[in-house]
Image (spheres, rainbow, N blue to C red):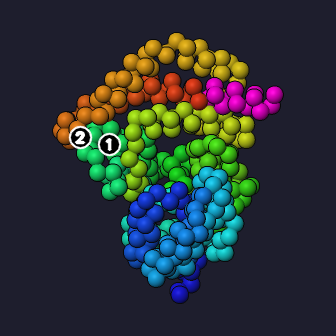
């Protein structure tokens, strides 16, 4: 195997959703430049499933290593995989992405620039899940065409404004020792979110690592969401922010522009949640009703799609604040 190809390992923590991981592996099998190894950790996976994946994909994906891991979440799974990497570089992906054929090649081109770098590339959101045959809705279009859930960094990169805020763990590479530095990705049991941005902040702020954009390193992130899933996700992010701020207050203060753990801010959130409950309930009812409408209800490029997003904004704030309050209460309960 050429030395360049052998220098990079792909790590994929996986919840092993039906068909999802296979589509990711198929896209890696189609790479123009193959990675040296691909390590997959099945969170709560079974031995029989590991063996089936090896039989199906080992002939097509060089250096495939699939392992069953205790059910503990994606961060412990990723940490276990990172600990076993033996190549100079590591590329982190999610199991629900499909990579364009130049992904590995484009990452290696930027990683080989000499200085310590953190590399990311285009990430397009898609709700077109082959396992979900329901007709497309306005919510699907919102997810795909706006920043409702996912912020594509292509425009920021083109404007020379790429920052740690654009570094998502579903498409991120660096020297392996950098990804392990200071304990690597934050592991907060039972929490979700911010761990990739926090790592990028730490590496750029504390260790002088430069950010690099790889235009050819694109992935499509396929994740169809319901309104209920969106709401749960937002509340979980609020709870996670409370815990992340305890571990790295500088990062969270810069990200949010405030100290979310201060007594004043927590008191503000409590008042805002109480006052905004009725408005948030009305926004949710309107959002749910409109989000369920067929995708073709409005034409492509319609400004009404952005107007629909405005129903989500106050609801999103309410949910995030509820999560922050929950995080504070849970911490108090653990301490007591």
Q: Which image quarter: residue 332?
A: top right
Q: Is residue 207 visible?
A: yes
- Cα gap from disc 2 to disc 1, whole angstroms: 7 Å
Q: Residue 332 in magenta? A: yes
Packing grade of label 2 (10 A; few <14, some 14-19, many >=20) is: some
The residue at which mark 1 appears reads as 140
Which residue: 52% across, 52% down? 168
When the figure is inspected, residue 4 is found, relative to residue 179, above or below; the finding is below
Which residue: 54% across, 63% down? 12
Specify whether 270 is left or right of 302. right
Q: Which residues are magenta?
A: 324-336
When the figure is inspected, residue 26 is found, relative to residue 219, above or below; the finding is below
Measured as percent of width and height from the top left, residue 247 is found at 73, 41
In contact (CB < 8 Å): disc 2 and disc 1:
yes
Q: Nearer the viewer, residue 214 or 180?
A: 180
Which residue: 59% across, 69% down? 47
């Amino acid at each position: 195997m050429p030395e360049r190809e052998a220098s990079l390992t792909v790590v994929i923590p996986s919840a092993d959703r039906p068909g999802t991981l296979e589509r990711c592996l198929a896209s890696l099998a189609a790479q123009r430049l193959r990675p040296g190894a691909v390590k997959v950790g099945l969170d709560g996976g079974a031995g029989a499933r590991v063996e089936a994946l090896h039989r199906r994909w080992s002939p097509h994906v060089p250096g495939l290593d699939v392992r069953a891991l205790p059910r503990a979440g994606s961060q412990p799974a990723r940490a276990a995989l990172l600990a076993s990497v033996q190549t100079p570089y590591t590329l982190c992906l999610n199991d629900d992405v499909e990579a364009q054929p130049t992904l590995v090649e484009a990452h290696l081109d930027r990683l080989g620039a000499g200085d310590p770098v953190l590399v990311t590339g285009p990430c397009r959101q898609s709700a077109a899940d082959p396992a979900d045959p329901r007709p497309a809705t306005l919510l699907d279009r919102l997810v795909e065409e706006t920043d409702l859930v996912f912020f594509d960094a292509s425009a920021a990169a083109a404007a020379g404004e790429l920052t740690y805020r654009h570094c998502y763990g579903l498409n991120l590479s660096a020297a392996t020792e950098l990804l392990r530095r200071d304990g690597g990705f934050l592991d907060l049991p039972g929490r979700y979110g911010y761990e990739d941005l926090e790592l990028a902040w730490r590496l750029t702020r504390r260790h002088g690592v430069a950010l690099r954009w790889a235009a050819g390193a694109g992935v499509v992130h396929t994740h169809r969401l319901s309104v209920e899933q969106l709401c749960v996700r937002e509340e979980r992010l609020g709870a996670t922010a409370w815990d992340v701020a305890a571990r790295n207050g500088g990062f969270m203060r810069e990200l949010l522009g405030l100290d979310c753990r201060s007594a004043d801010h927590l008191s503000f959130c409590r008042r805002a949640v109480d006052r905004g409950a009725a408005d948030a309930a009305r926004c949710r009812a309107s959002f749910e009703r409109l989000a369920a409408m067929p995708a073709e209800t409005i034409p492509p490029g319609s400004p009404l799609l952005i107007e629909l997003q405005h129903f989500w904004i106050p609801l999103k704030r309410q949910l995030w604040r509820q999560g922050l309050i929950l995080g504070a209460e849970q911490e108090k309960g653990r301490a007591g």
